[in-house]
């Protein structure tokens, strides 16, 4: 996507230096001193976590992320949080209320 001064790929050193400058320019001082988006990979991790948390089917997320489903769930399962009520409602929508009351 990006080319270095001599036409080849941008070196890791240059990319890291530019990333650090971009973080300082884009984030508040408190955010910039935190681990928020500390490395470019953090953006990918945030995207995958967000897709899972909004309910995108894990098989679709795995495909988009280039992971197997096994790897996706092993790495990101801990990111799926706070969805118990939504998932219970989805089950009730199909089967009706749980007589035991969950």
Image (cartoon, rainbow, N blue to C red):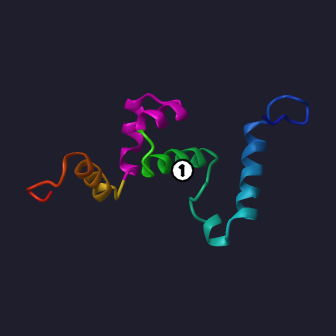
In terms of depth relative to the viewer, which is nearer, 81 or 35? 81
Residue 73 appears left or right of 29: left
Residue 29 appears left or right of 60: right
Q: Return the residue at label 1.
A: 46
Residue 79 locus on image (x, y percent): 40, 50
Q: Kindly give the residue lying farthest to the left in the view shown.
A: 100
Looking at the picture, does residue 76 appear above or below residue 25? above
| Picture residue at 72% right of the left edge, 46% below the top | 16
Residue 23 locus on image (x, y percent): 70, 59
Main secondary structure along the magenta-highlighted residues: helix
Residue 54 appears left or right of 88: right
Q: Any magenta on residue 63?
A: yes
Looking at the picture, does residue 27 appear above or below residue 22? below
Residue 61 locus on image (x, y percent): 48, 37
Residue range of the region highlighted in magenta in the rendering: 58-80
In terms of depth relative to the viewer, which is nearer, 79 or 51? 51
| Picture residue at 36% right of the left edge, 55% below the top | 81
Tell me the quarter of the picture where residue 56 sits: top left
Q: Which quadrant holds the N terminus? A: top right
| Picture residue at 42% right of the left edge, 39% below the top | 57
Quick one: label 1, few (<14), some, or many (20+) residues within 10 Å? some
| Picture residue at 34% right of the left edge, 59% below the top | 82
Q: Any magenta on residue 85?
A: no
Tell me the quarter of the picture where residue 11 sits: top right
């Amino acid at each position: 996507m990006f080319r270095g001064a001599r036409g080849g790929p941008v070196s890791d050193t240059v990319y890291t230096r530019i990333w650090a400058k971009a973080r300082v320019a884009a984030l508040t001082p408190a955010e910039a001193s935190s681990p928020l988006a500390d490395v470019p990979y953090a953006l990918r991790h945030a995207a995958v976590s967000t897709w899972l948390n909004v309910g995108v089917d894990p098989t679709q997320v795995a495909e988009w992320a280039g992971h197997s489903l096994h790897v996706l769930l092993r790495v990101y399962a801990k990111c799926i949080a706070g969805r118990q009520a939504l998932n219970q409602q989805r089950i009730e929508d199909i089967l009706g209320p749980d007589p035991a009351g969950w």
